[in-house]
Structures are given as structure tokens and as C-alpha cells.
Image (tube, rainbow, N blue to C red):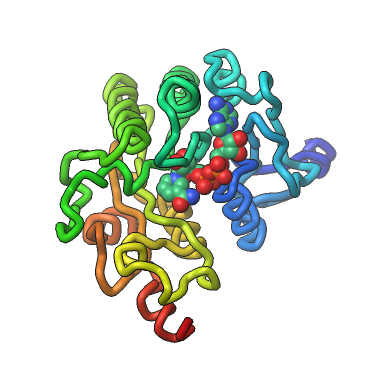
């Protein structure tokens, strides 16, 4: 028993889909820096899923990658991806607001998301965190602050694919009779602090979320809020003007963003 424990990795399996992507790579690094993944007593054991090979893989990470082996548009791949997992951070998608429906969104955002939720409910996964987008509410007038409770009103078909993802999260949670919980995060424009500049349009600052704030929010979604069964929350930084309000994200998840894109831009004077 002891020998088994010494050589093995403790922790629950956290599946990160789209792990080779921008946010997936950053969040993996964040988890490492927090000591939340790795050998011994670490909280999570990572399983990385992507059609591309993720960089910076550690020996203790499981990897399911490749054009076929990691393609979540295939239900069997999604089943292998989530087998035995405790939680799933579902990032895999085409993140472009201009993505074509038949050429890309249908497989990457619609089928893949359906498959992940279907497989997660079937496998007894406890929580799925779904990367929705500010594009799911992009149809509201620009001077309206959108609450998380407001119905989706996408401004483009990519946003509609994210609204579908939110809905499919809700559907599988409802059917799972309390076993599966899901949190869909309407993520704003993800950026490092260094890339924030006053040269940007004001509207951009109002939807910005820094990697650090987003990582804190993912941590809250994955570690906290045991009473949340299903929620759609807004995920942006503590910007002076907020395109989406943060009241329910703060209240339900204990999210405490530290960055204000307007203040950072002013301080940088660029
Ligand atoms: N970057 C942002 O500003 C932003 C804002 C709002 C929401 N989001 C959402 O966050 C998520 C991650 O965004 P990102 O910026 O890291 O994007 P990214 O393109 O860098 O990463 C997405 C990853 O998903 C993978 N992928 C796509 N289809 C797949 C499939 N069928 N099976 C397996 N893997 C697949 C891609 O290979 C890629 O590595 C996406 O769902 C995106 O829509 C991003």
C-alpha cells in the first residue's frame, strides 16, 4: 500500500479540455504555481485533452491528444476523456467570433460541448466548468450593463454556440438528479496586464479579464460553491466600468477580482 502511494499521484482527476490553448496553458501553469497539481498530496491530477499536443506536460499528467485521439467531436473520445474524473474544465472550442458554423463551430463548439456534458453526466463527474463568453450577450446595446441573470442575446453565431453550451450544461445537470453540477462562465476578453493599454477602445477595457483574475475565478468554480447546482456567471476583472455586472459571481462564488483594466491602462500611460 505504501509503495503504491509513493510511486503514484494522489488527488482527484481534473480534466482540462483545450489544454493546449491559450487559457488552458496559462491555467495549468497557475495550478502548478499554487501547488495544486503534481505528486504526493497535490489536490489535482491533470488529464489534458486537445486535438493539438499541449506543451509543458509533466510526467504525472495524463494526455489524450491528437487530431483523432483528442477530438471531442467524437463521443467515444469524450467518454475516454472524462472516465473516472472528479471535475472538468471545458475550454476546448473555436474561440473566434468570426468562426464559420459548418466549417468549425458545429464540431468544435456544438458537438464537442454536447459530448463532454453527455459523457460527464454518464460518468458521474461532480462538476463541469464551461468556458462561455461575453459574446453570448453581445447583442445587448453597448451602454447596457448585462447581469448574469439576463437571458443570452448573442451578437454573433459564435456567441450563440456559447449560449447553446450554457443551455446544454443546464440540461444535463437537470437530468442527472443532483449528481452533476455545472458553472458556465461568461468570460470577457482575456489578457495579461502587460497587454492592457490606453490605446484600446473603452469598450474593450469594460470586458477585460486578466489571466490572474480568471485563474482565481476558475479556482473558485472548481474548489468552492458546493451548493451551486447550476449557474451562469460573469467573468471579467474589477473594471471601473463593467459591461457585465459581477454581483452574483462575487456572492455565489466568493470571486474577488484584483485588476481594473482602466486603472492599469492609465498607470501604464500607453
Ligand atoms: N481567449 C478569450 O479571450 C476568450 C474569451 C471568452 C471565452 N473564451 C473561451 O475560452 C476557451 C479557451 O479559449 P482560448 O483563448 O484558450 O482558445 P484557444 O484556441 O487558444 O484554445 C482552444 C483549444 O481547444 C482545442 N480544441 C478545439 N476543438 C477541439 C476539439 N473538438 N477537441 C479537442 N480540442 C479542441 C484547440 O486545439 C485549442 O488548443 C474557449 O472555449 C473560448 O471560446 C476565450
Give the total number of marks visible in the rendering.
0
- Residue situated in front as seen by the camera: 48 or 93: 93
**Could you say where residue 54 lies in the image, as x and y percent from the top left?**
70, 41
Residue 60 horizontal/vertical position (percent): 76, 42
x, y percent for residue 244 = 25, 57
Picture quarter with the N terminus: top right
Q: In the figure, 50 relative to 21: above or below?
A: above
* Residue 185 in picture, x, y percent from top left: 36, 46
Does the image show residue 191?
yes
Q: Say left or right for 130 vs 177.
A: right
Residue shown at the point (38%, 29%) measured from the top left: 180
Residue 16 seen in render: no
Name the residue: 42% across, 73% down: 199
**What is the quadrant of residue 227 in the picture?**
top left
Picture residue at 37% right of the left edge, 35% below the top: 158
Residue nearer the viewer, 161 or 142: 142
Residue 69's place in the image compared with 90, above or below, is above
* Point 44% across, 27% down: residue: 105
The picture quadrant where one finds residue 101 is top left
**Nearer the observer, 24 or 191:** 191
Write down the quadrant of residue 52 in the picture: top right
Is 145 or 197 nearer to us in this picture?
Answer: 197
Amino acid at each position: 500500500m505504501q509503495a503504491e502511494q509513493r510511486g503514484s499521484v494522489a488527488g482527484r482527476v481534473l480534466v482540462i479540455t483545450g489544454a493546449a490553448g491559450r487559457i488552458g496553458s496559462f491555467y495549468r501553469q497557475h495550478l502548478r504555481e499554487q501547488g495544486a497539481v503534481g505528486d504526493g498530496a497535490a489536490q489535482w491530477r491533470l488529464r489534458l485533452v486537445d486535438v493539438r499536443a499541449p506543451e509543458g506536460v509533466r510526467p504525472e499528467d495524463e494526455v489524450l491528444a491528437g487530431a483523432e485521439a483528442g477530438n471531442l467531436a467524437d463521443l467515444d473520445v469524450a467518454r475516454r476523456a472524462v472516465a473516472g474524473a472528479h471535475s472538468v474544465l471545458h475550454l476546448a472550442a473555436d474561440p473566434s467570433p468570426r468562426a464559420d458554423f459548418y466549417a468549425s463551430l458545429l464540431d468544435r463548439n456544438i458537438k464537442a460541448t454536447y459530448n463532454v456534458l453527455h459523457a460527464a453526466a454518464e460518468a458521474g463527474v461532480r462538476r463541469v466548468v464551461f468556458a462561455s463568453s461575453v459574446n453570448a450577450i453581445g447583442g445587448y446595446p453597448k451602454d447596457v450593463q448585462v447581469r448574469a441573470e439576463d437571458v443570452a442575446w448573442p451578437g454573433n453565431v459564435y456567441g450563440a454556440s456559447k449560449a447553446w453550451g450554457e443551455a446544454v450544461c443546464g440540461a444535463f445537470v437537470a437530468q442527472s438528479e443532483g449528481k452533476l453540477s455545472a458553472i458556465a462562465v461568461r468570460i470577457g476578453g482575456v489578457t495579461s496586464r502587460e497587454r492592457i493599454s490606453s490605446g484600446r477602445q473603452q469598450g474593450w477595457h469594460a470586458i477585460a479579464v486578466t489571466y490572474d483574475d480568471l485563474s482565481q475565478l476558475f479556482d473558485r468554480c472548481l474548489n468552492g460553491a458546493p451548493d451551486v447546482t447550476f449557474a451562469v456567471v460573469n467573468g471579467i476583472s474589477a473594471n471601473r466600468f463593467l459591461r457585465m455586472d459581477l454581483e452574483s459571481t462575487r456572492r455565489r462564488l466568493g470571486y474577488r477580482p484584483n485588476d481594473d483594466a482602466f486603472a492599469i491602462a492609465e498607470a501604464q500611460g500607453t
